[in-house]
Image (cartoon, rainbow, N blue to C red):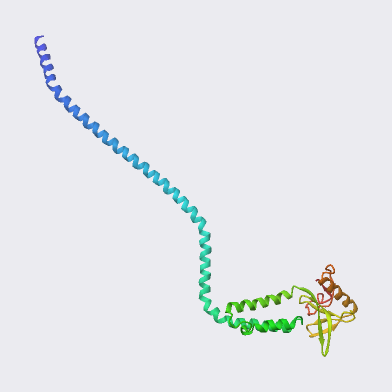
Amino acid sequence: MEICSKSLLCGAALCLLVLPVSGDELLQEAGQAQRAQSELQSRIDDADDEVRERLEELRRLEQETRRLSARHAELAPRLERQTETLERREVALDTLAETREALPSLQHRLVERLALWVDQDLPFLTEERRARAASLVNGASDPDASAAERLERILAAWRAELDYGREFDAWRGYLEQGERRREVEFLRLGRVGLYYLTPDGREGGVWRVDEARWVALDESARREVRHGLRIARDRRAPTLLHLPVSIALASPSVAGREVQP
């Protein structure tokens, strides 16, 4: 028992000697661990902040990408049209020199054809129409006019001639047949029919293009011409006129008698 007591005393003394040294080391290690943990947590927090910033940047870029895609889809058709316009303009510029060279010849042919048309057409307003065609020859009406202005005047003259084909007109004028000149009433149905009627209604005629002369009308046709004159002057409601036409039509069924004013 004595030996055991001595052993216990020695062991306790040994523990008292060792304990202070181990406690300091443990405290140092605990402090180091705590600092390491704090640094790690700081790095983790920094990493989280960076990740959040990256995520926000990614979301912003995605929104910008969607906006740009929508804008591209909106602009694409407009860009295609502009591209086509530029291509057409490039082609026009490439052929501009050729067009300028060909324009005087084209204008000359248009004027020649217009004058020929007037000469071969129904004989109405002949002097006025011939004078208009003659004024276009080599820009006689305005020698200082530009090429574009001369072309516009030629086209305007053609439009005036084309409008005659849609008109229903009546006027008082003079009919010359050889040395005979007398005042008559004229009726024109576009370019389909040209007629005259004397004031007393006893004589009338239709201009025949294929024969280039006036052909006399019978009483029934003269009565229809009187109806047409009243319609043209708004004195009668439009109705179907039974008249011979001035031009030779290909179809026998159409070459007959009915004309709608």
Look at the picture and state if 6 lies above or below 127: above
Left or right, 153 with reference to 248: left
Which quadrant does the C terminus fall into? bottom right
Quarter of the view holding residue 127: bottom right
Q: Which residue is depicted at the point 90% across and 78% down?
A: 219
Task: Indicate the position of residue 203 as horizontal and vertical percent values.
Answer: 88, 82
Q: Tell me if residue 31 comes above or below residue 65 in the rendering.
A: above
**On the picture, is 99 further left or further right than 178?**
left
What's the residue at 17%, 24% (across, down)?
Answer: 23
Callout count: 0
Q: Position of residue 199 (x, y in %)?
A: 87, 79
Q: Name the foreground residue: 190 vs 48.
A: 190
Residue 28 in the image, given as x and y percentages of width and height:
19, 29
Estimate the x, y position of residue 243 in percent, counting from the top left: 84, 76
Which residue is located at x 13 percent, y 22 percent? 18
Q: Residue at x 9, y 13 (%)?
A: 6
Q: Is residue 182 left or right of residue 20?
A: right
